Amino acid sequence: MSSAGVGEIMDTLGREAVAAARLLARDEGSRRNAALVEAAAVLRRRQDGILEANALDLAAAREAGLSAAMVDRLRLDPARVESMAVGLEQIAALPDPVGRVLAEWTRPNGLVIQRVSVPLGVIGIIYESRPNVTADAGALCLKSGNAVILRGGTDSAHSSRAIHACLVEGLEAAGLPVTAIQLVPTQDRAAVGYMLAGMTDYLDVVVPRGGKSLVARVQQEARVPVIGHLEGNCHVYVDRAADLNMAREIVLNAKLRRTGICGAAETLLVDRGCVATHLAPLVKALLDAGCQVRGDGAVRAVDSRVVPATEDDWYTEYLDAVIAARVVDGVAEAIEHIAKYGSAHTESIVTEDAAAAQRFLAEVDSAIVLHNASTQFADGGEFGMGAEIGISTDRFHARGPVGLEQLVSYKYVVRGSGQVRPG
Amino acid sequence: MSSAGVGEIMDTLGREAVAAARLLARDEGSRRNAALVEAAAVLRRRQDGILEANALDLAAAREAGLSAAMVDRLRLDPARVESMAVGLEQIAALPDPVGRVLAEWTRPNGLVIQRVSVPLGVIGIIYESRPNVTADAGALCLKSGNAVILRGGTDSAHSSRAIHACLVEGLEAAGLPVTAIQLVPTQDRAAVGYMLAGMTDYLDVVVPRGGKSLVARVQQEARVPVIGHLEGNCHVYVDRAADLNMAREIVLNAKLRRTGICGAAETLLVDRGCVATHLAPLVKALLDAGCQVRGDGAVRAVDSRVVPATEDDWYTEYLDAVIAARVVDGVAEAIEHIAKYGSAHTESIVTEDAAAAQRFLAEVDSAIVLHNASTQFADGGEFGMGAEIGISTDRFHARGPVGLEQLVSYKYVVRGSGQVRPG
């Protein structure tokens, strides 16, 4: 397909989305919820068809030689379809993020000013292989009153189309425009470039969900606002005043509960003040659990299985059973290390010293800072936000878990009785 | 100067700003306030020097043949210097926007989660001729804990340097890094391009303040987040249920109190349901006050002084004593007109009909919607926000008046007692 052809397709999607967004903005929320509940029912009814579509994607993936892990990300089964349906129902049950009075005050001249939440407008989502993103992201955008243009990966194209059809049926049943949730119909890579740079008249924000090459492309090409999800090079700092048992449990969980998520710990920092007591037990526990440890001299000294860490290791998000480990001179040097090497995602301090904890929480400039808890809590669901579209490492608009509250903007509603401005 | 030279200068400013931002983030707020109060005192002490610097700018402006209005924007006098000093003191007296607990909740597992406001980081401000922006924008950024790089216009270069020196002296006196507020030392136009596209590693957001050519350049070139200030094509809709006297006062004030500000009304919409009673008095009042009225057929019919409106007029931000006027079929058509032609800045409805007002306030998708009040209230000061850096027509991060609350981000602080994530 020619790029001009892609442009025409995308412009049409954009115009339809803007029109749908205007209609959604007038809805009271009940129809949006009804659409989600109905879409969940349709997902369950059409389970067989969805799994057949998924089988096509899986066959193509095997033929293309995708890794077992990639194929597993693609795979749907009855439990995963049910889990998508339940997800839609849970999102429907959340409080409406639109129309909330975020602040209200009265001016001396009698003007009553309200800051009221409104949808962002039209959201573009660019994602890769997981087909469930079609349901999750579509539902979060709809719940927050936004029209959405979904651009899924080629690997999951059949699955995404089948899931998208269920969402559309939900919209129809609820009397909402079916163009509120659109799926880009072409897998032409030019469509991604066009979303990033050519749709400034239509898109209010783009949310990329994917690996480093997508993120790099977005940073290079985007001319629309982006809610970015960069890497999570997360740290656990074990302070001299840490309870050893607690530290061990947190370090093991932060690193190994799941190694492939952005909140997994990638570097362990141990206070020189507790090297004698804490370092060996922590390092041995990691090694015994099957984790490779890449350490500085002090860490290597406690166990011969530790391999040397290079400068690159401190920057690396392994997303694997590998951890970098070093000794630091107390909380101050831990903060410095994180400032230099970290990605400002999620960091944890383990300590019984309230002053050290407070300093770490205040001075570490990350989206999420924790005291005596695992970095793997970096998750919108664990935060009680109900659902999330990802974890933002941006500082602008949304930071940390991106849930419904982060998918809205606001307007000011001012009520007067004839006031004019003097002077 | 070569562009390479500009890049080196700007990179140095960027690195210094990032380092300053880290130091500012540790400050409790008292030193930031002390710096502002001291800068105000220095401004007063150095009034003569500032006026001398301003005289150089004024002489150059006259030589370059700038319009009288432009020269007036540039001009400082003792009252304007005093007003800048008072402005700094007022900003110092505002509540600290940093470190506020924006939300707090406890999870079933005992984790206590706080969302805490933090500075955005490093802000770039690109502005044109008004020298007072140097003081206002510098002070707002500092108060909100941000480091700032100011890039003022060539016309006001001497004045801005003199004002900037006062801010630096305030920082020094308070023990804060002098690099917290930096002024780009070169007037090379390449510096603007470099701020927009070359400083993604240093700048967290850029705020452009200027005319259409600057805004267009920002939209074209920016690779960093932007808080944009586009045009204000503001509307007043006079409903059939409007009190005529109130409508007249509001229309005159919205259009004519000051014609050059972004909240000035540019189009008058009058409900067909009150044409017989309201249209002629409103149009004649505008004409009698010296305003040109460009009208549709119905408006031209009430007074021969009305000139015909063209399609372009409905899109135009005059910033002058000119208004476009037409008759619409009630609140529904008023909303449609605004959706098609408006800039989503500020719109007002005048009516005694609560249902019509509610519909207008809900369905007009503008940053500020008013009922029975003048559009000229679109101003951070009038909103009680203390000071503003402009009015954002973006939907992302900041919308409407951009005050201290809009110049911060947030982080999540999570306190536990050893929690690890199950499953």
Image: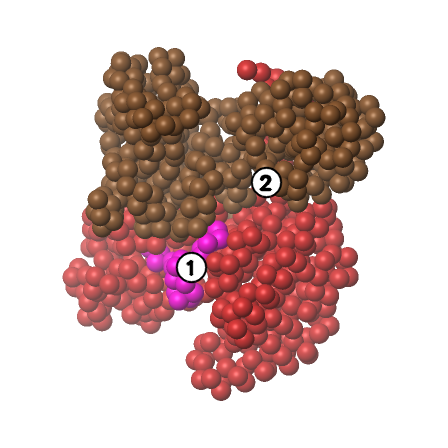
Chain colours: A red, B brown
Q: Quadrant of residue B52?
A: top left
Task: Check disc 1 and report its element: helix, strand or loop.
Answer: helix
Foreground label between 1 and 2: 2
Location of the N terminus of chain B by quadrant is top left
Residue at position x 59%, y 61% in the image:
A11
Q: Position of residue A332 (x, y in %)?
A: 24, 44
Looking at the image, residue A156 lies above or below residue A201 = below
Is residue B339 shown left or right of residue A67? right
Please tell me whether residue A231 belongs to the stretch shown in magenta: yes
Which stretch appears magenta?
A211-236
- In this rendering, the count of numbered labels is 2
Relative horizontal placement of residue B265, taking residue A339 as reference (left or right): right
Whether residue A372 is visible: no
Instruction: Return the chain for callout 2.
Output: B
* Chain of the residue under the numbered disc 1 shown in the image: A
Asked whether B64 or A304 is in front, the reply is: B64
Task: Give amino acid for label 2.
Answer: Ser
Most extreme residue toward the front is B304
Q: Position of residue B352 (x, y in %)?
A: 78, 25
**Image mark for residue B147:** none
Name the disc covering residue A221, or none: 1
Q: Which residue is disc 2 drawn over?
A: B343
Report, in whole angstroms, how far the alpha carbon at label 1 lies from the one at label 2. 26 Å
